[in-house]
């Protein structure tokens, strides 16, 4: 009995015999279920951040460069996973995250007026190159090099935001909910990557994501508490 690539026959067979399913039977199913849960949750990950910017009409404390690099990283990661033929449950969230990340950057540009020529150039360059990368119409060796570089891209996409938070001793309009979902998704993705026998490079990316998202999440918890205390003292 299969449903969306998930084989339930092993589990139901064991339960019908009055036995608890064995690890080799249960773990792959749990991995698939968790993978699809991540994909479903990813459809709303960036929305809290987008809504917070729209509500306050401000990008105070946010690093535009961080979010631009995220778009590049998601594009490369999505193209690579599709090209490698991984099951959708192993990477599906990347498609939804990419769309939301592009919308988020567009919103940030809108509230970062005036937009300079450099910003327009970066946007046009991405629009010109992204379709080719997503279609996988590039040299295989270059493709591997791009994917290897995307881990560095995701790492450096977090560093400007982490440094800005540290320098300002504030996280500004950074959304706690979005950061929490990013962190939780990375934790689960490590497990699913192992079960889906994804390349080690995919697993490394998830591990780096845990470290960087965890740092940002702790900064939000720390600095927002300080901001609340300051607010009470002012009152």
Image (tube, helix red, strand yellow):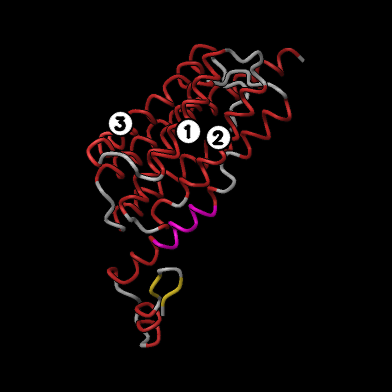
The kind of secondary structure the magenta stretch mainly shows is: helix
Q: Nearer the viewer, residue 135 or 92?
A: 135
Residue at x 59%, y 32% (from the top left corner)? 104
Is label 3 in a helix, a strand or a loop? helix
Question: What is the spatial separation of the Cα atoms under label 2 and label 3, in whole angstroms?
Answer: 20 Å
In this rendering, the answer to whether 230 lies above or below 41 is above
Q: Is residue 116 above or below residue 162?
A: above
Above or below, 9 against 143 in this view is: below
Percent position of residue 98, x then y: 50, 40
Q: Earlier in the sequence, mark 2 or mark 3?
A: 2
Determine the CA span between mark 3 and mark 1.
Answer: 14 Å
Q: Is residue 65 left or right of residue 203?
A: right
- Mark number for residue 71? 1
In the picture, the quarter occupied by the N terminus is: bottom left
Q: Is residue 196 left or right of residue 99?
A: left
| Cβ atoms at labels 2 and 1 below 8 Å apart | yes
Q: Is residue 27 left or right of residue 175?
A: left
Residue hosting label 2: 102
**Which comes sooner in the sequence, label 3 or label 1?**
1
- For the C terminus, give its image quadrant: top right
Identify the image quadrant of residue 220. top right
Front residue (pair 200, 147): 147
In magenta segment, residue 36: yes
The label on residue 149 is 3
* Residue 119, quarter of the rendered image: top right
């Amino acid at each position: 009995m299969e449903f969306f690539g998930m084989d339930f026959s092993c589990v139901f067979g064991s339960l019908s015999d009055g036995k608890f399913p064995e690890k080799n039977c249960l773990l792959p199913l749990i991995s698939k279920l968790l993978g699809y849960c991540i994909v479903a949750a990813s459809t709303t990950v960036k929305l809290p951040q987008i809504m917070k910017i729209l509500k306050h009409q401000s990008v105070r404390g946010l690093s535009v460069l961080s979010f631009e690099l995220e778009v590049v990283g998601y594009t490369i990661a999505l193209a690579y996973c599709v090209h490698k033929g991984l099951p959708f449950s192993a990477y599906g969230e990347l498609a939804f995250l990419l769309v939301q990340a592009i919308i988020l950057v567009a919103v940030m540009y809108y509230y970062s007026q005036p937009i300079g020529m450099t910003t327009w150039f970066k946007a046009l360059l991405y629009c010109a190159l992204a379709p080719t990368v997503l279609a996988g119409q590039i040299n295989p060796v270059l493709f591997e090099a791009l994917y290897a570089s995307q881990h560095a891209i995701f790492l450096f996409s977090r560093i400007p935001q982490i440094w800005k938070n540290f320098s300002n001793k504030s996280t500004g309009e950074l959304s706690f909910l979005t950061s929490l979902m990013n962190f939780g998704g990375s934790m689960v993705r490590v497990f699913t990557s192992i079960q889906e026998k994804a390349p080690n490079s995919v697993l490394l990316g998830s591990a780096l994501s845990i470290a960087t998202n965890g740092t940002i999440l702790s900064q939000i918890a720390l600095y927002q508490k300080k901001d609340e205390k300051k607010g009470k003292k002012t009152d």
